[in-house]
Amino acid sequence: MLAEIGLVSTFLAFVAALYAIVVAVIGGRRHAERLIVSARNAALLTFLLLLVATGALVVALMTEQYQMSYVWSVSDPATPPFYRFTALWGSQKGSLLFWSLLMSLFAAAALLINWRTHRRLMPYVIAYTMATLAFFVGLVLFYENPFERWWLVGSQAVSSALIPAGAAAPTAERLAETANGLNPLLRHFGMIIHPPMLYLGFVGFVIPFAFAMAALASGDLSTNWIKATRRWTLVAWLFLSLGLLLGGRWAYDVLGWGGYWGWDPVENAAFLPWLIGTAFLHSVMIQEKRGMLKVWNMFLVIGTFSAVIFGTFATRSGLIDSVHSFARSEIGFPMFFFWAIISLISAGLILWRWNRGELKDEHRFVNILSRESLFVLNNVVFVMLFVAIFWGSFGAPVVSELFMNENITLGTDYFLRVTPPLFVALYILMGIAPLSAWGATSLRRLSRSLIVPLALTAVLLVGVVITQHTGDPGALFGYGIVSMAGFVALYETYRGATARRRSLGESWPRAIGALFTRNRRRYGGYVVHLGITVIGIGVIGSTLFQQETQRTLSVGETLDFGGYSLRYDGFTDAIAEDGRRMQIADVTISRDGRELARLRPRQDIYPTMPMTIAGSYSTAEADYYVLLVGWEETSAQNATFKVYINPLINLVWWGGVILILGTLIGTWPTETVPAQLRQAAPINGRARAKA
């Protein structure tokens, strides 16, 4: 019964989405309000129908309905209830349904929130969001249906959504005995939250794309579409950032290689829309402030959407092999076709409006040091990063296979050669741009504004040399460039608070609070910059100064490495509640004769694969990261350990928290400033003079 409920609900959602597309376009062209309202109601209905379908699949997972092939493939009787629920997105079929549910949720929320304020755009917003939704729901129905059931046709078991001729249902007991269970790689908190965060980021970026295309289709080419989607873009960017961070944490904890980012193609597939989306977030500010880059912003929003669709295609079609990707599937060609058609239609709309002269910029660039010029350079670097990473991840392998009949894969060395100079340029621009002004900025003024951040950076570098005993020129250069960007964010916040104190006599806490309350977008952005600075310092430290060793120890023997001592205390062979076998080493970590921690690195033995789970001792200074890589099968008297010391790695996670905080500040609605206080609002660190 649950399979039928889910199947019928999904089919009705597909029909409702198609109806909404047709009726919205007709209503928009004829200015027929009744048709537009009907299309909106159909679009809202898709969310309720997909919620029912998803709920049916969740109930089937929780109640062990193994006659449904998806439930059989991602769970078994030993799977704990929590992992049973998260198995909803544990494989291709369920994750596509979940993706569709989130897409319908974002579309419904966008329609409800913006319905009254942006009615002219609504018909085409409905059409674009429902076209995307209909495509993914169609994939669920016709290619990757999670509501298929097992049937016996003669002696052969087949999976089908409909009852085959002459089929009989297999016994529930037999299905339970043979159920696959959840992929062991997904049994981690980071992987439980990581996919939903990525999906929310992906579907969230569909909303600004739909509004941009609605502006082109309707002819409303003002900044209305930007104002309508600014928070949607920030929300999508926030979720995508969180998904990337959680994915890194999962890789660090579960994959057992001592790192968190390996330039895997699937990692890069999620990183690509983040890059273009970040460029778009910066670029639309120029259009809002100066009426410039209208065509460029349209292409950026198309690029972000295309990167989302391509990333989904790359990880689900079998185009690439990765520990992160789904199994090879038949959805590759439909997804590629949809991506190409939508991108071509959207680019055609831009060129049509551009040829009509409707996307002309209102101002020109007059100064290379102006904020808009620096933002454009920032965009160029983001696009260069996108191209370099896309080529290394997908371009070179695909082109070599198509035209050279061999598979050429560009590994980590390629990315470590190509991307660092571009990241350096980004951090430099991130430090300089906030100090420049719109329109024109003199070199003298910009240099004067940099004095304090550069002085603070010099002090920090001296501290690094003294405390870390390092004189590595590359590391110091990297720390300096990254730190300067962070000090600029702090200095600009300080200048703004100082201006308020001088003009209004406020205390420091009140002045800082007022800055963030009344200009959340600007000062929330400074917090985001600070978070990215902290992440950058963590990446430099953990990449350039990582130490590694491997050694076999007998029980009671000690390994001295990196100023720490590791003592092998014993070995435990245990069976967990879910039936997996755990091989656990007990070790003690000491430093200067003082015991710091007792760790239990282990290997979890599943029927399908072993999992190497690290034990780690974390401080602000470094992670002491221990892997159990081998042991004597008979007595475990001897065990082999691989040990990493990862300096400053926790700054990557702490910087992520700061980044999320800054995004939340920037997304929160800004208070209206009373007229009598506007004259005291700080601009570029100075109080605005009375009119």
Image: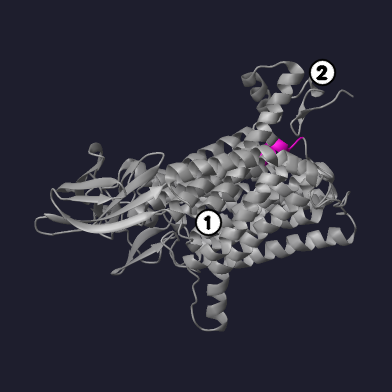
Report if residue 313 is visible in the image.
yes
Q: Amino acid at mark 1?
A: Gly
The residue sitting at 82% across, 18% down in the picture is 676
Mark 1 sits on what residue?
A: 474
Residue 192 vs residue 279, the one in the foreground = 279
| Mark 2 residue element | helix
The residue sitting at 72% across, 65% down in the picture is 344
Image side of residue 290 versus residue 343, left or right = right
| Mark in front: 1 vs 2 | 1
Q: Report, in whole angstroms, how far the alpha carbon at label 1 lies from the one at label 2.
A: 51 Å
Q: Which mark is residue 676?
A: 2
The residue sitting at 60% across, 49% down in the picture is 481
Residue 391, compared with residue 213, is above or below; it is below
Q: Which residues are magenta?
A: 108-116
Which numbered disc, 1 or 2, marks the residue that appears first in the sequence?
A: 1
Q: Are the two marked residues, 1 and 2, in contact with CB atoms closer than 8 angstroms? A: no
Image side of residue 344 versus residue 172, left or right = right
Residue 680 vs residue 172, the one in the foreground = 680
